Image: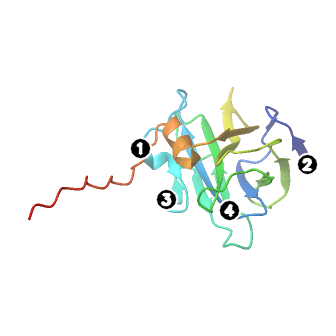
């Protein structure tokens, strides 16, 4: 098993990998399928608990007893997708990563053997995190430790990668009451 540091990468020795993200608090884990320009093709490329499967990528719930995971089958990832970004955010509204040390574990999805792990250092007021990416380089799938935090939550990450995030409707302005 390889303990990764920010920016480090490893070649993947398995064609199906699971990236689970564990922390002392409940996390929402998601995955985004990205093209060469670093964007999703459509909102269908955002994989999470409400949209648990896409081409070659699946969200797996831990059911509250084990960490949630993003499973990537590199043989089923569609042409044109060069990177799958794995993200995490605390489930509790407004909670940050301050004092929470999430650990991403990259496993062979077929036998659960551990290929690598990564714990991002020095997190603070981030409310969402790009923790790991699975990417294609020169025909070889690899994993990179990222650890990039966002202060504007999962919506900020999703928007940065081209997902349309629907904002809650604003309340209509109050109208004066005339007797």
**In the image, which is nearer the foreground, mark 3 or mark 2?**
3
In this view of the protein, which residue sits in the foreground, 150 or 18?
150
In the shown orientation, is residue 1 left or right of residue 21?
right
Q: Residue 68 carries which label?
A: 4
> What label does residue 1 carry, if any?
2
Q: Name the residue under label 3.
A: 51
Q: Are marks 3 and 2 in contact (CB under 8 Å)?
A: no
Task: From the image, tell me which residue sits under label 1.
Answer: 164
**Figure check: 151 above or below 8:** below
Q: How is the image coloured?
A: rainbow
Q: Do the residues labelled 2 and 4 touch (CB within 8 Å)?
A: no
Q: Which of marks 2 and 1 is nearer the N terminus?
A: 2
User: Residue 142 occupies which quadrant of the picture?
Assistant: top right
In this rendering, which labeled residue sits more in front, label 2 or label 4? 4
Q: Is residue 62 left or right of 47 when viewed as pictured?
A: right
Task: Residue at 38%, 54% (x, y): give it.
Answer: 168
Give how far across and how far down residue 94 sits, in percent: 61, 56
Residue 77 visible within the image: no
Query: Is there any visible trace of residue 18 in the rendered image?
Result: yes
- Decide: few, some or many residues near mark 1? Use Cα within 10 Å; few <14, some 14-19, many ≥20: few
Q: How far apart are marks 2 and 1 (CA)?
A: 37 Å
Residue 49: x, y in percent? 55, 62
Q: What element carries label 1?
A: loop
Q: Are marks 2 and 1 in contact (CB under 8 Å)?
A: no
Query: Pointer 3: residues within 10 angstroms few (<14), some, or many (20+)?
Result: some
Dot 2 or dot 4: first in sequence order is: 2
Q: Where is residue 153 in the image (x, y as percent from the top left)?
A: 58, 47
């Amino acid at each position: 098993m390889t303990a990764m540091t920010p920016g480090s990468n490893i070649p993947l020795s398995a064609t199906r990998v699971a990236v689970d993200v564990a922390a002392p608090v409940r996390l929402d884990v998601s995955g985004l399928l990205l093209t060469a320009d670093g964007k999703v093709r459509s909102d269908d490329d955002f994989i999470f608990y409400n949209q648990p499967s896409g081409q070659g990528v699946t969200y797996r719930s831990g059911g509250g007893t084990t960490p949630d995971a993003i499973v990537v089958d590199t043989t089923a990832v569609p042409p044109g997708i060069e990177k799958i970004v794995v993200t995490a955010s605390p489930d509790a509204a407004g909670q940050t990563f301050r004092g929470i040390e999430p650990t991403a574990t990259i496993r062979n999805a077929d036998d659960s053997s551990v290929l690598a792990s990564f714990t991002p250092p020095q997190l603070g007021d981030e409310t969402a995190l790009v923790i790991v990416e699975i990417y294609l380089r020169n025909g070889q799938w690899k994993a990179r430790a990222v650890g990039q935090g966002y202060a504007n939550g999962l919506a900020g990450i999703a928007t940065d990668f081209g997902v349309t995030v629907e904002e809650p409707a604003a309340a209509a302005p109050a109208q004066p009451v005339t007797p």
